[in-house]
Image: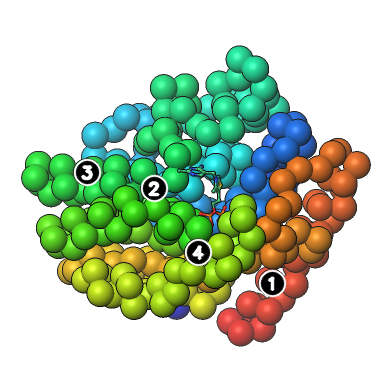
Amino acid sequence: MPLEREEFLMLEQKARDLRKLIIKTVVWAGSSHIGGSLSAIDLLTILYYKYMNIDVSIPDWEDRDRFILSKGHIGVGFAPVLADKGYFPLHWLETFNHTHSQLGMYLDKNKVPGLDASTGSLGHGLPLAFGLALSAWLREQNFRTYCLLGDGESNEGSNWEAAMAISHYNLSNVIPIIDRNHSMLDGCTEEAMGIEPLADKWSAFGFHVIDVEDGNDMYQLATAIEAAHAADIPSVIIMQTKKGCGVAHMTDDNLFAGFDSEKQTQCLKDIDEYHDARMRRKMELIV
Ligand SMILES: Cc1ncc(C[n+]2csc(CCOP(=O)(O)OP(=O)(O)O)c2C)c(N)n1
């Protein structure tokens, strides 16, 4: 098992708390990309609370691992993680996307401590991650760069140029992770612009493809990340997730973007029920 029992319990509790904080932040903001935040929050949790080599007291530490949020529209899902880690005060979240706030819908590196890049225009994150990885290799630095991409974002050609370059330089210190929730703003990815066979495409670009059957499962994520760490060729993680994961009426909903405080109570209750059920399933397997 790649996770100790106590570690697993800690990560599960953290993901539950962060899901709730995302809901609250969306209510403070008025609206935002909830679905793609909830599909990716388990991955953000395991990276920030287990795998990334970072020091919150030195956000610009030269040798820290980097994280590039290429699907930058889920700032509302990422800012709660950075706040909870202690990069900035939690009360900043109450101003998310308000005029003059430090936290805009698309997070700005010049305003948000702990953020490694300003993103939001899809297709820019992986080229940035490639540059960081190439620079680390040239300077003989040991940090890793993780990059989270949307599946709809795969439509942007710049991702494939970056993939080609990562493969050309055989960089295993950069790990693209694709949130395969099968949905984008225009609807189902395969109807808007088919991206399958996605694994074969990455494979053809020279990547070791790591499929995660359930990207909302901590054990599966841990196994995948450790496989990517162990590989000596570039790896890509393709994680199957559910948009809106954790809130029943949002699950697999393409368009869901906002709600008011009245619905907040129901969402928080849904999240508890979802996490209780998921924990019960997992504990049966572990014991
Ligand atoms: C270059 C560019 N074009 C369009 C947009 C508008 N946009 C914001 S989110 C989104 C859909 C992204 O879908 P996906 O990558 O699957 O993200 P997820 O659904 O997982 O959140 C689009 C098209 C953008 N941010 N950047």
Q: Which residue is mark 3?
A: 131
Q: CA distance from mark 4 to mark 2?
A: 15 Å
Amino acid type for the residue under numbered disc 4: Met
Q: Which residue is mark 4?
A: 193
Label 2 C-beta lies within 8 Å of the nearest ligand 1 atom: yes
Q: Which comes sooner in the sequence, label 3 or label 2?
A: 2
Badge 2 marks a residue whose secondary structure is loop
Image x and y of residue 72, in percent: 49, 42
Amino acid type for the residue under numbered disc 1: Arg
Q: Nearer the viewer, mark 3 or mark 1?
A: 3
Q: Residue at x 28, y 46 (%)?
A: 127
Q: Nearer the viewer, mark 1 or mark 2?
A: 2
Q: Quadrant of residue 214?
A: bottom right
**Around disc 1, counting alpha carbons within 10 Å, would you say few (fewer than 14), some (14 to 19), or many (20 or more)?**
some
Labelled disc at residue 158: none
Q: Quadrant of residue 264?
A: top right
Q: Which comes sooner in the sequence, label 1 or label 4?
A: 4
Q: Residue at x 38, y 35 (%)?
A: 117
Residue 234 falls left or right of residue 221: left
Label 3 C-beta lies within 8 Å of the nearest ligand 1 atom: no
